[in-house]
Image: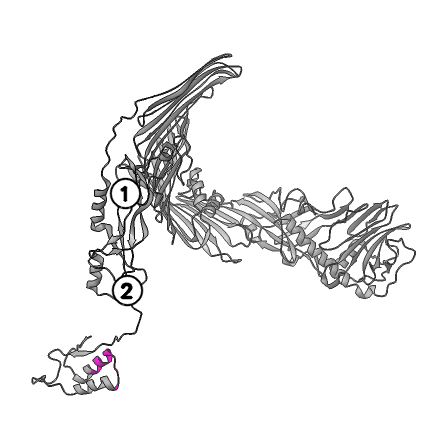
Amino acid sequence: MDPNTLLKTVSALLWKLADDAARTLRDPLAGLQALTGEHPALRDRLLEPLAALPDSHSLLRLLRDALGDVTDAGSPVRAHGWKRAPGAARGLALVLTDGGSRAVLAVSPGPDDTGPTVDVVVTPGVTFSRAHPDGLWSVTAEAQSQDAWTASFSPGGAFVTPAGTATITLAHRAQITCGPADGPHISMDALHLETTASPQVPFAVELGVLGFQAAVLPPALSSVLGDSGATTTRKTDFAIRASRADGVRFKDGGARLELPVSLNLPGVTARRFALELDHDDTEVVLRPTLSLFAKPPALPLSASLDGLGLSLPVSFDADRIGVDPLRIAANFPIGMGIELAAGPVSGGGAVQQRGEAGSGAYAGVLDIDLGVVRVQAIGLLQLPVKGKQLSFLVLLGAEFGYPGIQLSFGFALDAVGGLVGVNRRVDEKRLRGLILDGNADRVLFPGNAVARADEIAGSLEACFPVARSRFVIGPMVRITWGGRIVSLSAALILDLPDPVRAFFVGRLVIALPDPVVPLIRLQANVFGKIDPGVPSVELLATLTGSRIVGLPVAGEVFLLLRGGRDAVFVLSAGGFHPRYARPPGVPQLQRLSMDLGNGIISLRAEANLALTSNSLQFGAKLHLDAVIAGCGVEGYLGLDALFVWEPTLSFSVHVYAGVAVLAFGERLASIGIDFTLEGPAPCWHAFGTGTISVLFWDVSLDFDERWGELPASAAKAEDILPLLRDALAKPDAWTAERSPADRSGLRYTDAANGSLARGEVAAPDATFRVSQKVVPLEKPITRFHRVGVPEQLWRITPVERATDDPMDTFGPLTQPFVPGEFFAMNDEEQLSRPAFEDCTSGVRLSDTDVQLGTRHLVDESYETGYKVEPGWFTAPPPRNGLPLAGTGAFVLEGFARPLRAAERADRWRAAQRPIDTMKVEVLR
């Protein structure tokens, strides 16, 4: 709960309470007259004392209990009438008098329920100190002002800095108990309320609670745990502070305060005791909560409860100020766990509330070991409350005992499971981060699920958030080899329906020579994505927590296969060459590295290898740091190599090395070299620099050499025109494309549809596509099949029919082409441009030659005849060729009353009275 929001709620409730109390005094205040001889700040405003103060309102009853009879002439504080301005509603004023000086606190009801106005008037030259120690309450008021102090406050108004200082202290000195003695209840030894105001100190109210104690265990649970009559928490003191700057909060914390706790119960350990502040529209709620772990005597189980507590509603209304004992309610724990240890069967489970109270979000964990199999289940449930969508997510896993279910060749099935989510989706960014950070075991067969319930549930909530009409399905498996020397846990997670996305998550562990005490432990976390819409396949693996004989190993491996317009292939282990421009979607990778130092000498080795559609890249670096107290040796040796075969084969190798001797942090001597070799096209090129430094003497040598220019004669390119003609003459270069809208309105027979599918005929409203893959069209090219050619441009001129009549073209067609085969590119373009680019490959042919007439109605009627099979009649059929008796009646019906074919067939059957089975074939 936000403390500032809580302050607004409490302020609104108190303003309304004060306004209601002032309105109840309308009749007693009606006849009071203004006092004469008062200070100008009080003249015509302070009215006569009240003769009686009714206690029909909770605030007035509190005033009577705390101050006694404020209408008694001997009381240090008297109740007066108050009229703050001519025409204003009359209010109540509490007046503290010291000789001829007064301090007045007045409340006047506001017009039209706008809230009351509080006036504070302190006359100058006076110091007040008054105490009222009678009864259960103790009240102390102090006020001091050198000048007249007048201030007014109202809801929503700006705060007025006081011209003097004032302190009011209210204390209740007897124990307060709320709730039944044998059930959940609270008690306090004393209450202490103090308000302060001064020009230097911001206005604040502080409520101190002394000896707070709570009994939050239900009687039934107390008896199970072995109730010894001491199930309440230890007495604790705390304070709640309210100010404009900080809102309403605990003095030693925010809206939640952790307190010390101890319970005198056998087998019970209290883990946490806290107080929380909350509110609703009509009251403030104080919630003491307790978390404990219990193991009942003589029972083979243990239980944990989190958030067990009470709701204490603090009302601010006309009937009551404070906690209503009848409305104290025990809260259901926000988390429960239970563990069973009964011989061969053991396990446990936990249920936990997620988010705020009443949010309808829950998480559950079940972990049972049956000896031969261990079953784990983790579930998330979101109920449809407060407009939220009903959803759930379940993670299941069954782990088989060692050595698992043997497959063959040393492989064994170690565990199976799955993930199912309804109205859930996959958050790719969070799932990727979870896997690559080394936390794959939170979604792949998590161990010790009950103890890690909060951790696992939080990760599942983040990676699979609520999403309407989405579904998540993910089968998972764990396979081992060599007695768990190699272990692979993997899951294929589908995010459905459209757009369909598939994710692969995995965890590979290699432990040699023994998984219990491994000398070599390599752990790779794998995240993959399959997007059939592009299409693309992406795979990223990272080494976390890996060691070789105690030496840490790290690095990342990445694979990307992508089709479509931005087709690309990338395979990298440890990153790329510094000059390589990564395509979109390819991340910056961590180099494969290994620390070889021993604490005194630091030696680090790094390497990378990458393969793309047009390049091979690899590199390595070795760094030595043997320096103690600023004295020693440091050095490095590195290599970066890049091989490119598109558009021509070339390579670039960069080698750099250096070593330096240090003394007390200063360099005594050093030597370094940095050179690059490139070639063979267009020529061999070597350049670089070498340096030698001794104390203050530096020498450097630069070189830049070229040799082996290209020969004058180059390979001859193929003739493009014959290849292009042959490609366009092939049948597969031509396609008939029917219009998406059926403009003809025709329906074809099966034979016609077969001819259309084979390309023998075309629909009358079809358009034609002609396309080839020899050369890009409508774009100048300078290379063909990796050989340079004079710049040229190819296009398709209007197509001619067999009758030599031209057909217009419209709309270009595209195909993916390798740019390095047709366009000249420098080194940077060879590395950065995509492996394939869409270029014009053909055209569509116009459909304007087909002349379609206007739509009109046609006669779609048909004739119906009847074919009668032999053996249908009770008498032999006629042999003279004359119509059967009654046939004319059926013919006449065709004119008198139209009949459907089915009805005619039925009537014909009935008239013929067949001997056996009846059958009439209707011909249309």
Q: What residue type is labelled 2?
A: Gln
- 3D distance between C-alphas at marks 1 and 2: 35 Å
x then y, percent, for residue 200:
77, 41
The correct choice, above or below, for 694 with respect to 31 in the image is above
Q: Residue furthest front?
A: 804
Q: Is residue 738 visible?
A: yes
C-beta proximity under 8 Å, tags 1 and 2: no
Give the left or right position of residue 802, taking residue 215 as reference.
left
What percent of the width, then of the height, locates residue 633?
46, 16
Nearest the viewer among 705 and 280 is 705
Question: Closer to the camera, 316 or 794?
Answer: 794
Q: Which mark is residue 382?
A: none
Q: Tag 2's secondary structure?
A: loop
Q: Earlier in the sequence, mark 1 or mark 2?
A: 1
Residue type at the position of mark 1: Val
Residue under label 2: 851
In-image side of 854 versus 604 (left or right)? left
Numbered range of the magenta stretch: 896-907
How far from the left and from the top, in percent, is residue 622? 41, 23
Q: Which of 255 and 725 is in front in this view?
A: 725
Q: Quadrant of the C terminus?
A: bottom left
* Residue that lies at the very extreme toward the right in this rendered image: 37
Q: Main secondary structure of the magenta part?
A: helix
Name the residue carrying label 1.
775
